[in-house]
Amino acid sequence: MTPEEFRQQMTQQGFILSERQMDQFQQYFQLLVEWNEKINLTTITVENDVYLKHFYDSVMTAFTPQFSGTGSLCDVGSGAGFPSIPLKIIFPDLQITIVDSLNKRINFLKTVATSLQLEGVSLYHDRAETFGQNKAFRESFDFVTARAVARLNVLAELCLPLVKKDGYFLALKAAKSQEELTEAKPAIALLGGKVIEEIDLALPQTGDERHILVIQKKKITPKKYPRKPGQPNKQPLQ
């Protein structure tokens, strides 16, 4: 997907990108490739692939009917800034908070935010388990996203404590797994969430499937969650 094809696809979805936004995506791509030579950010570095598999893949989050593009969003384990930075470019008024456990990635994202002149971006070098117990952030976000490979019952424990009541946890998955969803439902309920819907999408050109699980926060999360760092992975909620 060339940058122009990316723009055309976004137009088809109802998002008209300005020259400034296109420039921001191009700068982001250049910084990603440049920094990737120093630290491991991504295995995808060819321009057309970055625009399709990182940028377009990230902004597909906005195709969910629950996503308003306003308010606050926390991206847990953001890595190189996906999906939050592309969403911030598309929705300049969205307040973004990024949490990542590797300081090198946070330094990269600081450079991105400064270079792209993105306002309303907060970056934290922290474990999700610790961040979720911080009273300043707990149950304070309209949206929480995770584009991670962890199983859903693990992601739910890391993300749902950060979602405010009636807000949404949007879990981005490359593959549909009814087994994973069934396994996670008790944990989601325990943490105060309810599965609203699973949205099935596909990347243009390749047809690669993508799935967004929309989980709404219905009740306050019990104070004991998330548990200590490492515990959700070692002993996932059943």
Image (cartoon, helix red, strand yellow):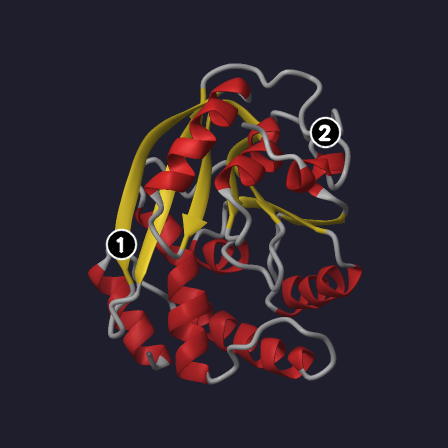
Instruction: Classify 51 as above or below 133.
Output: below
What residue did someone put label 1 on?
201
Q: What residue type is labelled 2?
A: Arg
Q: In which quarter of the image is residue 106?
A: bottom right
Q: What residue type is labelled 1?
A: Leu
Task: In this rendered view, identify the residue nearer to me: 104 or 27.
Answer: 104
Instruction: Tell me if mark 2 has few (under 14), some (14-19) or many (20+) residues whose alpha carbon lies within 10 angstroms of its own.
Output: some
What residue did someone put label 2 on?
227
Say whether residue 64 is left or right of residue 164: left
Circles 1, 2 touching at the beta carbon (< 8 Å): no
User: In terms of sequence position, does the residue under pointer 1 or pointer 2 come before the other?
Assistant: 1
The residue shown at (48%, 26%) is: 188
- How many marks the image carries: the answer is 2
For the residues labelled 1 and 2, the Cα–Cα distance comes to: 33 Å
Q: In which quarter of the image is the N terminus?
A: bottom left
The residue shown at (50%, 46%) is: 93
Instruction: Tell me if mark 1 has few (under 14), some (14-19) or many (20+) residues whose alpha carbon lies within 10 angstroms of its own.
Output: some
At which x and y percent is residue 82?
53, 59
Element type where label 1 sits in the image? strand
